[in-house]
Image: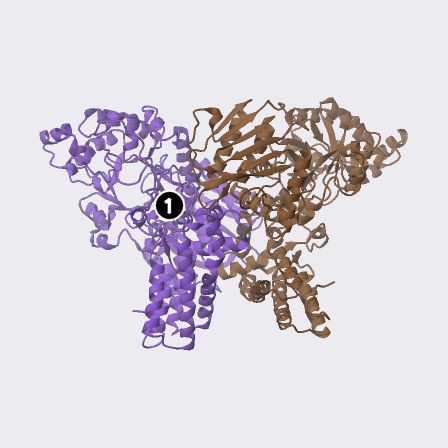
Chain colours: A purple, B brown
Amino acid sequence: MAAIQVQVTRALSILVLGSLLYPVLAGGQQPQILNLMPLPSSVQAGTGALRIDSLFSVELTGYTEPRLDRAVERFRTQLSRETGISLSGKSSDRTKATLVIHTDHSSKPVQQLGEDESYELEVTNAGAKLTAPTPLGAMHGMQTLLQLVSISPDSFTIPAVSIKDNPRFIWRGLMIDASRHFIPIDVIKRNLDGMEVVKMNVFHWHLSENQGFRVESKKFPKLHEMGSDGLFYTQDEIRDVIAYARDRGIRVLPEFDLPGHSTAWFVGYPELASAPGPYEIERHWGVFDPAIDPTNENTYKFLDQFIGEMARLFPDQFFHVGGDEVNGKQWDANPKIQEFMHAHGIKDNKALQAYFNKRLQAIVSKHGKSMIGWDEVLDPSLPKDITIQSWRGAASLADAARQGYRGLLSNGWYLDLGWSAARHYAVDPMGESASTLSGEEKSRILGGEACMWTEYADAENIDSRIWPRNAAIAERLWSPQEVRDPVSMYWRLEVISERLDRLGLMHKAYYRQMLQRIAGPSTPEEFAALRTLGDVVEPVKDYKREETVTVEPTSATPLIRLVDAVALESDAGRNFGELTDKYIASGCHDAASEGELRARLTRWQGNDARFQPLVQKSFLAKEPAATSQDLSAIGTVGLATLAYLARGQHASADWKSEQMAIVQHAEAPKSQLLLIPAPSVAKLVEAAASENGCSPAK
Amino acid sequence: MAAIQVQVTRALSILVLGSLLYPVLAGGQQPQILNLMPLPSSVQAGTGALRIDSLFSVELTGYTEPRLDRAVERFRTQLSRETGISLSGKSSDRTKATLVIHTDHSSKPVQQLGEDESYELEVTNAGAKLTAPTPLGAMHGMQTLLQLVSISPDSFTIPAVSIKDNPRFIWRGLMIDASRHFIPIDVIKRNLDGMEVVKMNVFHWHLSENQGFRVESKKFPKLHEMGSDGLFYTQDEIRDVIAYARDRGIRVLPEFDLPGHSTAWFVGYPELASAPGPYEIERHWGVFDPAIDPTNENTYKFLDQFIGEMARLFPDQFFHVGGDEVNGKQWDANPKIQEFMHAHGIKDNKALQAYFNKRLQAIVSKHGKSMIGWDEVLDPSLPKDITIQSWRGAASLADAARQGYRGLLSNGWYLDLGWSAARHYAVDPMGESASTLSGEEKSRILGGEACMWTEYADAENIDSRIWPRNAAIAERLWSPQEVRDPVSMYWRLEVISERLDRLGLMHKAYYRQMLQRIAGPSTPEEFAALRTLGDVVEPVKDYKREETVTVEPTSATPLIRLVDAVALESDAGRNFGELTDKYIASGCHDAASEGELRARLTRWQGNDARFQPLVQKSFLAKEPAATSQDLSAIGTVGLATLAYLARGQHASADWKSEQMAIVQHAEAPKSQLLLIPAPSVAKLVEAAASENGCSPAK
């Protein structure tokens, strides 16, 4: 089967890298679009298609359970929604339904790491058969089927196809930080819906932070009562989410971050900290001093009871203890801790944290769980059954694997840093340092997790920070390593993104609503001007937002600015870059590209004038006023440049430096926004001033 | 106060009819936007504005009840959502909160017709005070306050203002037909949210039809079990909706339509019909023969028990019995019924229905309710406490009032017929025939109801069929009669429409999702072409859709065509018409209008070429292919015409007739779609061919 995998995916890649925008099956009479994400490990095209009408029926054979019935009901609902067709079909003979789903046997009562998630799918013009060893594979197969539904010149159909599919990695996760900003249950659930679509199987729930403790504890109620501003999940809500996730083949991994990132614990229980209280919930962002006291035996008594309670609440076999970013200041300043370290030969804070982690690991293990932590928990003194989640880098992950620890990659997959989907997509758990590992060492790399930290995301915009880019990471974790063409990825990403929108994710719909707030009541022209601006800017990347604050934000600062509203990856900006490259690559002869560039530049040139009324009316529109001027300025530069290029004239060095000064001014971030098309306009200026006439910039 | 009312609203109208696009308060230092809908009966502008920050606090004084607490909680949530600001404010002194809401006394346990709904609102830069006799007024006032929130150059604010407000009519309703297409609870609830925003106070729930019986009956379970395809509301769900409505100051009026429109009743209880069964749920649209047997005593025994059960379930004082469109065929064909009529001196079917209604009225009255029915129930033999809902016309309503019956207007407010908001807005319960009534007769006209029949609406598109146009009807029913400027109305309608979108109504969001289904996976250009087409077409009006079917639709026919997806009123179409009129009125000298017309016409001219790939791929895009060609054709005509007009040339009669032939072809509906800009293009052609140069067409 491996041979088929590579063959098919190479065929896909070759076709994609050819003239077509979307992946195509080689088998049928005519090319068929396969808008699947993640792409399956093996695909063979058939002939014809299965027509969908109201008689479409679904039956389960073999092993069944209520979860499968519910999955079929969801499948039917979504098929109805996609097609608008009410499904009334019931087959008299279960094995003759339009879609027969055969499951061999049950999966584990609590979903385990490494359970069989494979499935096979046969679609012909007469019907569809989905076969899977366990309900997990059956559910994945239903998602694939839904993605295969397409409109044709006659009807809605599913193309004839033969698919064998199983994941490349057994751990495919999304972490959501529900602590810095509280993320309500309905938002969590719709993100679980999204994870199901892209076959992710671990929801990692970051539940405690300096800024908030988000779980009801019956043993230690002051944790949520005093540490959450009333924004916490009840245990019933958590059980509900876990059941919801299980219904979608998703494990729920809780994280309680210790010994640092723990201020919110100490509001109710200051005696746990390494410095005297009282403590208040932290309102700022950053790394803070408070840390649990690892030298106090009461700490371990507390944790034993607390972890016991949480271990019963969260059934997953893994338990995440955080462990990142302890600055050690409270430890340094506490004489009793220093004394303890001296007495026990603990030479530094790193060793002290390792001591804490060993004690913690014993407690976690006692309660039947396997411990997982961020890079910092890695210490040779810890037993090999802990798992390392690498946020620091691929080298750190490879190092852990070499030392015998299992690991997960998250470095390169921090969704909040604003990287492009293509950049996330290029990251591979087996890339870089990991590529030199032995087979056994490689087997310790279980997969990875996308991470959504929420300093600058809340219930309103978080979906847009996760989706659609998370689907590219999901594909990296599921599909064969050879699947990596970004052109195909971006085409399919947009298709999936639309599907997620129809499913209720808010990553598209939030945008107009946030722009409406910024604009206030406005004319269509004013609103269009705001949208034109918003469409071509992105927030500054990585940790630049922290580095460029004028007024330090707090957790109460409303996330209502343009930087909070715009997408982290500008489709319009990427599209302008592609057009520019295509135009220059044509020697500036491609009239169609030139026309499209001119249309966009013309719109931008006039945009600031249309935007001005909003600047007068709204403080939120006033903030990006300089960026709006920059956009019009690069519009003017771009149009002047196109005029040179279209006439085949060579622009002078003086002209070039004048234009480049304008463009460079526009490239400098303002109000934490990047003007994405500016570098492309610079390329055009370079081309116009090139000695050889139009030619790509170096 | 009446003097102030008229004065202020006239001032608004005058300002609106002047140069400004939006209603303006005359008092402040500079004009302030008052985006209220419905407009209050009296408004006085103050100076300054109340700033909204996280310390904004709300307190209740005077009479309070849990419903008011919930209303305040909703107010806080919505204020937070509008501004993005988390409200942490709690006032130590209840009377010093930012917003103090004082309620004098309770309203009735079951909301009654004519309860006091008035309120007064004083906003200064120091705070806001809302005073109301009852919770109903307090809740209306909170909605007004939310609509006053606006963005300023510094912050979010509420302008200083003094408002005294009460409704013109005491019955302001929206009817939803949940029977022809079943409308799920969540859709009902979000429409109640919308009604609250525009201060409507009656939700009329059309619960039985030939196509479905939608309420669980414990007495007669075969009604919902056999008459609903499983699509019905449980009694718990109904109680939940009633409580939800009460929380929003809305009465819930149930309608069980008899003696016609009743096929679904007879599936389970064929013995009630006037012809032998068996019966099946009706799948087609129209007026059908089945009618209850009014001559059978068992009919009344059944109805006594059934209405008893429903009278307990629905607490409202009114009970709607339908009564419309009985074709009488089953009565004519039944010898026993004919015999009964003869024996009792009942001369025709109208008299037979009056006999039935008298019996029915006695039962309704016995169960403590006041009967209401459509025009057809009007008969002098019925007691004067019945109420007539007029779907047939204003004359019918005036006639009822003259005869001593109370009445409601619905004629002119059928939302499903596709009229413009302006046309609905111009309808007035006191207009036409009613204007000649005496004062006492006029007092019998309680108000009216917008009606949403659902032959061509389902859960997916119904919000778009109701909103935003329903807000214009709501304003007609609430605001002073003098408030009737359509320019002001359209401006405020769009502001309210955006607010409803943010509140979760789907009338905007559904559109892109339905277009996505039609397009399937597509390039941005293809999708934009579909959207450009969809933006300028409307479904054929009134009952033309029924009259132009090619394949007769059934209740199972998916509502997924372009005609189902597009808005019933095209903003882009109206806008093009306004631009055209403005351009011609300028003697074709206004360069800005000309430029905008040219831009639109250019886009349309090229649109069909961009649309073609979808026609090849999707059966749903193929259907409107001819309309797409028409759009490009009128684009070409329009551009050629502009060229004449811009040169000041006089076009020849031959040229004119050639162009008009093209436009007239485009004006003819195809696939049940009207191409809205076509008549405006015809106006341009007329102007270009006018003897006197550019001048308005006759």
Give residue A555's quadrant in the image. Answer: top left
The three-letter code of the residue at mark 1 reads Met
Looking at the image, residue B322 sits to the left or right of residue A325; the answer is right
Can residue B293 be seen by looking at this rendering? no
Quarter of the figure with the C terminus of chain B: bottom right
Can residue B337 be seen by looking at this rendering? yes
Task: Tell me where residue A365 appears, x and y as whole percent.
Answer: 24, 31
The residue singled out by tag 1 in the image is A200
Task: Tell me where residue A50 appears, x and y as whole percent.
Answer: 52, 54
Looking at the image, residue A251 sits to the left or right of residue B201; the answer is left
Q: Residue furthest front?
A: B29
Task: Tell me where residue B295 appears, x and y as whole percent.
Answer: 82, 30
Where B538 sits versus B481, above or below? below
Looking at the image, residue A514 sits to the left or right of residue B689; the answer is left
Where A203 sits versus A279, above or below? below
Total labels: the figure holds 1
- Residue at left 9%, top 31%? A342
Task: Tell me where residue A458 appears, x and y as whole percent.
Answer: 40, 41
**Chain under disc 1:** A
- Residue at left 65%, top 42%? B9
Query: Foreground: B284 or A653?
Result: A653
User: Counting other residues with Cα less than 10 Å from the Cα at mark 1, is it few (<14), some (14-19), or many (20 or more)?
Assistant: many
Quarter of the figure with the N terminus of chain B: top right
Where B590 sits versus A355, above or below? below
Give residue B279's quadrant in the image. Answer: top right
Query: Foreground: B122 or A65?
Result: B122
